[in-house]
Image (spheres, helix red, strand yellow):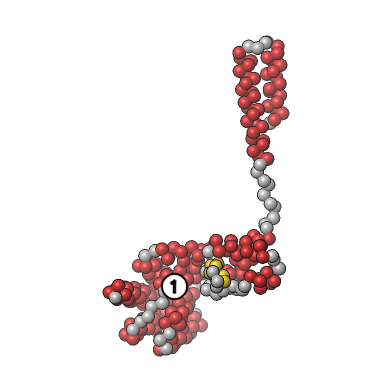
């Protein structure tokens, strides 16, 4: 392109020399000078753009490696990762490279740095991190409604597709929940309840639904938290879970969906009552 532009300018100047300094020739030469100035400026601006590196940096490779480790469950959500020195020795990287990689994972929402307490796994994927933040900013009724939609469908599908092994697992989790409630261990009861509903979703046999619920499950649990029940409420809660498992065992799709919706409805009503009581105090 530059050869063409320079050749064009040369012809114009030769023309001006032959015909003399006419206004038309002068105007054409001036236009050419402006065009050549633009070409030169363009060439200079291109030189200021650095060429991208052909291979990923060590920190970027480390981010990918640690992300895969987290997604595979190597560091479960909620756990504290090994200290900095231990990671440097295990991974064979320097302090600055490690900190750059961990900082990137914090930015992505997979890790959470707590001053004076270390770094914890906040989510197993970027999607889960986004859902945790989104659920945290949503109204609690909306979160419960989302849970109803997911669990109602999953429960109906589980009734049609569950295996005997999956049914046995649900029965075992019911027994674990009863034991936790009998011991008045709210945290343990909440954990068992979360495991129970995840097991129901897995029994649905829908891989995509399972993946979505695994991402959303942490968001729902983080937002709703554990609820303490009085004796009567705990009995109703447990009875509905038994009703759900009975329907799944009987391959009663409609009954399973109704039981799942009733569980969420009871949770919503109970939470509203707890909130009113707290406000009254």
Q: Tell me if 234 is positioned left or right of 57 in this view.
A: left
At 62% from the left and 64% from the top, the residue drawn is: 99
Number of marks in the rendered image: 1
Q: Tell me if 233 is positioned left or right of 50 in this view.
A: left
At 37% from the left and 80% from the top, the residue drawn is: 228
Q: Position of residue 174 (x, y in %)?
A: 43, 84
Res 137 seen here: yes
Question: Residue 146's image quarter?
Answer: bottom left
Question: Residue 187's image quarter?
Answer: bottom left
Instruction: Name, please, the residue furthest toward the left.
Output: 280
Q: Nearer the viewer, residue 36 or 218?
A: 36
Is 240 placed above or below 117 here? below
Q: Position of residue 203 (x, y in %)?
A: 48, 76
Q: Tell me if 164 is positioned left or right of 12 in this view.
A: left
Q: Position of residue 150 (x, y in %)?
A: 42, 69
Is 252 placed above or below 38 here? below
Q: Position of residue 64 (x, y in %)?
A: 63, 63
Q: Tell me if 163 is positioned left or right of 15 in this view.
A: left
Question: Residue 226's image quarter?
Answer: bottom left
Res 200 seen here: no
At 69% from the left and 66% from the top, the residue drawn is: 93
At 27% from the left and 74% from the top, the residue drawn is: 280
Classify mark 1: helix, strand or loop: helix
For label 1, count other residues whose C-alpha is less than 10 Å away and answer few (under 14), some (14-19) or many (20+).
Answer: some
Is 196 placed above or below 115 here? below
Residue hosting label 1: 221
Please identify the quadrant where the C terminus is shown.
Answer: bottom left
Please identify the quadrant where the N terminus is shown.
Answer: top right
Q: Nearer the viewer, residue 173 or 18?
A: 18
């Amino acid at each position: 392109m530059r050869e063409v532009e320079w050749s064009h300018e040369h012809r114009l100047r030769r023309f001006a020399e032959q015909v003399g300094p006419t206004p038309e020739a002068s105007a054409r030469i001036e236009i050419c000078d402006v065009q050549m100035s633009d070409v030169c400026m363009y060439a200079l601006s291109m030189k200021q753009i650095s060429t991208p590196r052909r291979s990923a940096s060590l920190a970027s490779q480390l981010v990918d490696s640690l992300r895969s480790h987290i997604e595979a469950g190597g560091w479960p959500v909620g756990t504290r990762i090994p200290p900095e020195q231990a990671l440097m020795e295990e991974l064979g990287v320097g302090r600055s490279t490690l900190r750059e990689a961990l900082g990137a994972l914090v930015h992505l929402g997979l890790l959470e740095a707590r001053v004076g307490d270390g770094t914890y796994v906040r989510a197993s994927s970027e999607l889960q991190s986004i859902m945790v933040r989104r659920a945290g900013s949503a109204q609690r009724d909306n979160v419960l409604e989302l849970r109803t939609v997911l669990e109602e469908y999953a429960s109906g599908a589980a009734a049609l597709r569950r295996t005997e092994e999956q049914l046995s697992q649900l029965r075992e989790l019911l027994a674990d929940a009863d034991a936790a409630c009998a011991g008045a261990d709210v945290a343990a009861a909440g954990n068992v309840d979360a495991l129970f509903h995840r097991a129901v979703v897995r029994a649905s046999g829908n891989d995509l639904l399972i993946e979505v619920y695994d991402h959303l499950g942490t968001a729902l649990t983080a937002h709703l938290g554990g609820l303490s029940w009085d004796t009567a409420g705990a009995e109703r809660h447990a009875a509905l879970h038994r009703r759900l498992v009975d329907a799944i065992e009987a391959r009663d799709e409609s009954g399973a969906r109704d039981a799942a919706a009733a569980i969420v409805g009871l949770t919503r009503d109970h939470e509203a009552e707890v909130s009113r009581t707290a406000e009254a105090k």
